[in-house]
Image (tube, helix red, strand yellow):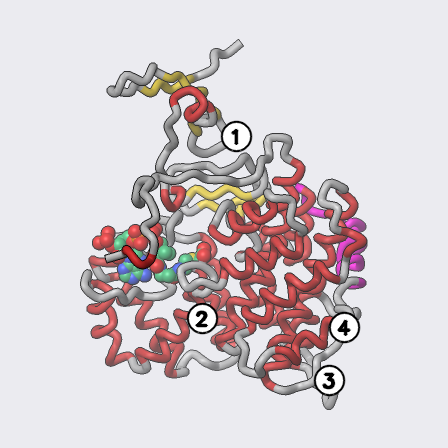
Amino acid sequence: MTQQRTATINFNDGTPTLELPILAGTVGPDVVDIRPLYGKTGKFTYDPGFMSTASCKSAITYIDGDNGILLYRGYPIEQLAQHCDFLEVCHLLLKGELPKAAEKKEWDDRIRKHTMVHEQLARFYSGFRRDAHPMAVMVGVVGALSAFYHDSTDINDPEHREISAIRLLAKVPTIAAMSYKYNVGQPFMHPRNSLNYVENFLHMMFGTPCEEYRPNPVLVRALDRILILHADHEQNASTSTVRLAGSSGANPFACIAAGIACLWGPAHGGANEACLTMLEEIGDVSRIGQYIARAKDKNDGFRLMGFGHRVYKHYDPRAKLMRETCHEVLAELGLQNDRLFKLAMELERIALEDDYFVDKKLYPNVDFYSGIVQRAMGIPTSMFTAIFALARTVGWVAQWNEMISDPEQKIGRPRQLFTGSPERNVVPIARRG
Ligand code: CMC
């Protein structure tokens, strides 16, 4: 029998020495199990931003940021992007295995049958301003789904969790496309069951009742790849938000709405939109130097959006695949000479050669390229993050489901290092100087 490895913490303030178990995963860094720390010593750990904290055990996604590796259930992202479509990847993330051919058909059919939303839900949209940001609409409408499915919100029943997962996967594209249609003042398009998942989304986005919409297969493949690459990413901010919201026993629709809210921020899913906004602001290749100088200036809060990553410090494997797709789409649409795309390619070239970016390992990330691809496809900038949310829904649901099934699961309740005033007495208002 191998001996349990341990780590010892010595305190120089009289607190007795503490021995803590070291746990090993299948791959990746070991973790020190600090759960007994507070009970045995009365001390907490301090780790804002979770720089050194594993918040859970998970068997879904593995990232090795130093070596640019991303695995879903053990499969490299490059192989999944090449051999599978998005719904196969959804099956993998949710159920642990890729579907066999017969299972795939059944799976696709099941999702297809749930793409419509309740007619009553469509009325929610008219409560929003026409210019509402699609993410504002998504947070509200996805959260509101819980009001429609009281029959399936027993989170301890695996069948309820499964049907909620299917409903979310199937309906989020419909909800996202409706937020776009509402914005442009066109009628909502009902989903069409003869189309596949991505074709159907494009049909609901760009189709109108006046004429048939025929999706371009190169663009369908590109969007499918965007969805695969964004499907899950371990314990990132929005996934941790979903887990934290779910740890209280909240229903899955409410938890996914919380994930959407977190994803919206520009340091996370909002980066692809922020990147395109930045490109528009730069406007011309001749102004790139000025913006690079601002990004390097410590006294200027400006950052090059679409560059850098918390985990990938060598390169982002998703960015490599997205770059390939980006060039394919620009060629298919004859857009290589478009002003903004030329600017983006020049920015990429300069940043990859500039010492500041090279030394700090700030490579273009997946959102740099996915924003460019989506713009080329005619998707408005404000929809980029909504499409990220659509893709990430499966990851959120898989992680939420894993958390609920984990016997070690507890309500998430971090502690703090208090820096405010110690106890003091209230002075009646007339006597406050
Ligand atoms: N432009 C200029 N300088 C940068 C950038 C950037 N995009 N990103 C980081 N730096 C600098 C930063 O100023 C700091 O410099 P110093 O060491 O001199 O203080 C150093 O690089 C390290 O930065 P950090 O903020 O400590 O790094 P982080 O790991 O906390 O942040 C990040 C990662 C993604 C939030 C950050 O790189 C960033 O803000 N990038 C732009 C936004 C973006 O593209 N986000 C999308 C991430 S990919 C999608 C996803 O997975 O959600």
Give the Cα separation between the discs numbered 2 and 3.
Answer: 29 Å
Residue 399 image position (x, y, % from top left): 60, 45
Q: Quadrant of residue 186?
A: bottom right
Give the Cα separation between the discs numbered 4 and 2.
Answer: 30 Å
Helix, strand or loop status at disc 3: loop
Residue found farthest to the top: 1
Instruction: Answer few, some or many: residues within 10 Å of disc 1's Cα (few below 14, many 20 plus, some between 14 and 19).
Output: few
- The quarter in which the C terminus is drawn is bottom left
Give the Cα separation between the discs numbered 3 and 1.
Answer: 50 Å
Does residue 306 appear in the picture of this structure? yes
**Image height of 296 relative to 44, above or below:** below
Q: At label 4, which amino acid type do we have?
A: Gln
Range of magenta residues? 96-113
- Taking the spot 43% from the left edge, 42% from the top edge, the residue there is 64
Residue 41 image position (x, y, % from top left): 38, 22
Dot 1 or dot 4, earlier in sequence:
1
Dot 4 or dot 2, earlier in sequence:
4
State which mark lies toward you, 2 or 3. Answer: 2
Residue found farthest to the bottom: 210
Q: At label 1, which amino acid type do we have?
A: Thr
Q: Do the residues labelled 1 and 4 touch (CB within 8 Å)?
A: no
Q: Do the residues labelled 4 and 2 touch (CB within 8 Å)?
A: no
Q: At label 2, which amino acid type do we have?
A: Glu
Instruction: Answer few, some or many: residues within 10 Å of disc 4's Cα (few below 14, many 20 plus, some between 14 and 19).
Output: few
Which residue is labeled 3 in the image? 212
